[in-house]
Image: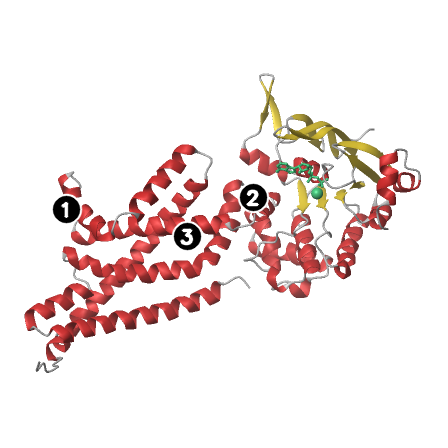
Amino acid sequence: MMSEPLLFIENLHKSFGKLEVLKGVDLTMNASDVVSIIGSSGSGKTTMLRCVNLLEEFHEGRILIDGEEIGYTLKNGKRQRLPKAQIARHRALTGMVFQTFNLFPHLTALKNVTLGLIKVRKMKKDEAAEVARHWLSRVGLLDRQDHYPGQLSGGQQQRVAIARAIAMNPKLMLFDEVTSALDPELVNEVLNVIKDLASDGMTMLIVTHEMRFAFDVSTKVIFMNEGRIGEQGPPAELFNNPKSKRLAEFIQNSTF
Amino acid sequence: MDYRLNFDAVWRSFDLLLSGLALGLGLAIVSIFIGSLIGLIAAFAMLSKNKLWRGIAVAYVTAIRNTPILVLIFFTFFALPQLGVRLGKIESFVFTLTIYSGAYLTEVFRGGLIAIPPGLREAGLAVGLTEWGAQRWVIIPVMIRNVLPALSNNFISLFKDTSLAAAIAVPELTFYARQINVNSFRVIESWTVASLMYVFACYIIAAGLRLVERKLAIP
Ligand SMILES: Nc1ncnc2c1ncn2[C@@H]1O[C@H](COP(=O)(O)OP(=O)(O)O)[C@@H](O)[C@H]1O
Ligand SMILES: [Mg+2]
């Protein structure tokens, strides 16, 4: 029996004004896949993740999560964005981790994680705290649960952000260059957390400039080039035998 | 010049001065609370994409900030009744002070909202909060903490502005000081004591608000 793909993107188009940023992207992911997106700055990687998380509107194409189309519906043959409450529900199918952490600065690490559990998942406080402690402990920060973001290092903040996203029990985790804003010595603690989640079978779509990490963790790597998927394949194939000149150049100019 | 200081008349009426001080504080507290609500709504209106909302908010803030507060007080107390809106003097003054503080707080909150990085709203949305939820649980609490010092200053100004209520015979501190002055001719004594009471009260309030600010500050 064929199961539904966990993420199905078909012919995704997105423009900012006259600038077309995504020019028809197709992507299929199955449960437990870890897909890394590489590519030069401005190629549309962030925009693609933000479309999947419905933080951006898109003009054409469909995105399905677990068989359910998200964000838009057809009404009398016309494509229409869903009402806000539905958008919020669809958005919660995915968990997003940002380059700049974006922790809630007025809340402790624990409360950063429990906010969504209480306000969105409608959990009781105690139950939410228990879930939050479980995930803070998974990212190695249980002893920092009462610290505010301003009292944590960049790497610690990003690990809290990961805990905050994954505690919501999303079907798919989205990572957008989550180590780019970190001092080099803090990068690995974050990457190790992501690897740990991968070994758990979490489905993840990861934009990254860490080539070594992409090579190690991915089931598939995608090379984005000027708003299109330039090339895709298993990491070994893509990194060792790039077919296009663009990818070969990109890999050559990247550090491993 | 042979003026002998004699505070007897002032001390005899000191309880009146105290009750006037308390009333002034009460007026300021009520006004800043309701004014904050108005200011918050107007700040969101100013930042909204809707031209009508924006227009209303800008008109409100511009009109109020460019009118002397004493004129606003007289307008509400003398002119509004002619238009059929009859308020008691205390209600009339609270109404004016609320509208007045709302206009200034609109600017404070608008600045606070602009200063919040957009990523914070998106992080709220990303955990599944609705647009309103992200505002309610993330943006507004962070913004309020950030503008707390400005709020404190506004409150102290507002408290001092309550002395203008004497102009429409609201029995607050300035009103009683003048009453004592007129009845006893103790000019220097009554105004000295009234001034010192304002200074003392403002000092205590400021110290209290600093404590609150420190307690609520984002670490
Ligand atoms: N909000 C926006 N408004 C206008 N242009 C944007 C916006 N966001 C991104 N872009 C443009 O879209 C292109 C792709 O951006 P992005 O998806 O961030 O690329 P990447 O993440 O691959 O570096 C860039 O040219 C960028 O300038
Ligand atoms: Mg990017």
C-alpha span from label 2 to label 3: 26 Å
Q: Is mark 1 within 8 Å of ligand 1?
A: no
Q: Which mark is residue A148?
A: none
Name the residue tied to disc 3.
Answer: B108
Q: Position of residue B122 (x, y in %)?
A: 59, 44
How many numbered discs?
Answer: 3
**Residue A32 left/right relative to A107:** right
Q: Residue furthest top?
A: A76
Q: Residue at x 75, y 60 (%)?
A: A186
Disc number placed over residue B129 in the picture, else none? 2
Is residue B110 among the parts visible in the rendering? Answer: yes
Colour mode of the rendering: secondary structure
Give me the C-alpha separation between circle 1 and circle 3: 30 Å
| Outermost residue toward the front in this view | B1
At a point 43% along the width and 69% down the height, the residue shown is: B211
* Mark 2 CB near ligand 1 (8 Å cut): no
A92 up-or-down from B165: above or below: above
Disc 3 residue: CB within 8 Å of ligand 1: no
Q: Position of residue A25 (x, y in %)?
A: 75, 29
Characterize the local packing of mark 3: few (<14), some (14-19) or many (20 or more) Cα atoms within 10 angstroms: many
Which numbered marker is on residue B78? 1
* Amino acid at circle 1: Phe
Depicted B171 relative to depicted A72: above or below: below
Mark 2 or 3 closer to N-term?
3
Q: Amino acid at mark 3?
A: Val
Of the residues under marks 1 and 3, which one precedes in the sequence?
A: 1
Residue situated in front as seen by the camera: A215 or B128: A215
Percent position (x, y) of residue B63?
Answer: 30, 43
Q: Secondary structure at mark 3?
A: helix
Question: Which is in the foreground here, disc 2 or disc 3?
Answer: 3
